[in-house]
Amino acid sequence: MASGARTDNDQWDLASSVGATATMVAAARAVASREPDPLIDDPFAAPLVRAVGIDFFTKLVDGELTLTETDESGAAQVMTDVMAVRTRFFDDFFADSAAAGIRQAVILASGLDSRAYRLDWPSGTVVFEIDQPQVLEFKDATLAAIGARPSADRRAVAVDLRDDWPAALREHGFDSSAPTAWTAEGLLVYLPPEAQDRLFDAITDLSAPGSRLATEYHPDAGASLGKRSRAIRELWKKHDKDGSIPDLGELFYPGERTPPADYLTGLGWTVSTRPRPEVFAAYGRTFGSGEAFETLKNSLALTAVKS
């Protein structure tokens, strides 16, 4: 089952809890990749979703169900549009970091992210992926089975972010004296407020001058996102025979948290933020109106450079 409230030491695979959200996001990437004039091209998303085996998401990526069939209100299409723009934003972050000479990247809570395989990394780039052991083992085996090969020196760091992940990262050859490109994509709302601060503390301690960071921030700590996701889940229930669609509202951590821009500035980073509508416009996409968009319009895309 994909639902269930969070606990301090909860575990998951890609068909349950937080792991199922990674599968949902991969399904959105697969659907977005086959749209006319797509913003992204993720050829690995659909095979990964099929391998997880959640019936609803498999039918979406195989075209047996369309977003219109699952939700006539258009809210599900909004999710796909947002994931396409978000994915492209982080893709471009890595491309810009590489152009600036950075040859070390860390993808936190990588889930079913396939950037180590599908992006054009410069020679000599090392990409570290951090996630729970069962998540990385599944992805490794699935991509190997279809003959996929990384386009960089990919190193899977199997560790929970609640444990001593900096030590695990160093054990896999991470060089804290070299600039690093860090991403925390779709991660912060799944962390308790104090854990968010600890994550940024650890990143800062590991980052040489010139390092870069990209993340996103929802000012309401995910409350409105949780409400909206529950509404979509209710619409999808008739297609969810095994009860595997995650209830994001149960997975987000509530509570007031320090805005990342403020916290990172205090740690010596130079921070830039853009509201989601501006990010849409930068990619030639129109950010719509209505309740589904209203929930998301105040979300911020954040990039930072370590001084």
Image (tube, rainbow, N blue to C red):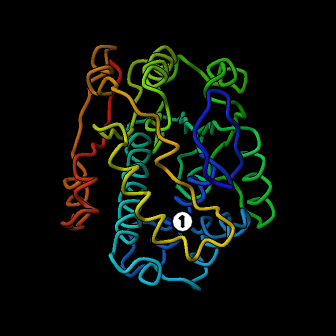
Residue 106, percent from left and from top: 55, 35
The quarter holding residue 97 reads top left
Q: Considering the image in quadrants, where does the C terminus appear?
A: top left
- Image height check: is 177 above or below 129? above
Residue at 65%, 38% in the rendered image:
131
Residue 287 is left or right of residue 200, and the answer is: left
Residue 108, percent from left and from top: 55, 36
Residue at 60%, 65% in the rendered image:
45
Residue at 24%, 62% in the rendered image:
291
Nearer-the-camera pick, 66 or 158 = 66
Residue at 39%, 38% in the rendered image:
215
Amino acid type, callout 1 = Asp
Nearer-the-camera pick, 77 or 268 = 77
Residue 163, percent from left and from top: 66, 22
Q: Secondary structure at mark 1?
A: loop
Q: Considering the image in quadrants, where does the N terminus appear?
A: bottom right
Q: Which residue is mark 1?
A: 42
Q: How many marks?
A: 1
Nearer-the-camera pick, 10 or 271 = 10
- Image height check: is 244 above or below 125? below
Residue 178 is left or right of residue 100, and the answer is: right
The quarter holding residue 63 reads bottom right
- Image height check: is 114 above or below 262? below
Residue 99, percent from left and from top: 39, 43
Residue 16 is left or right of residue 91, and the answer is: right
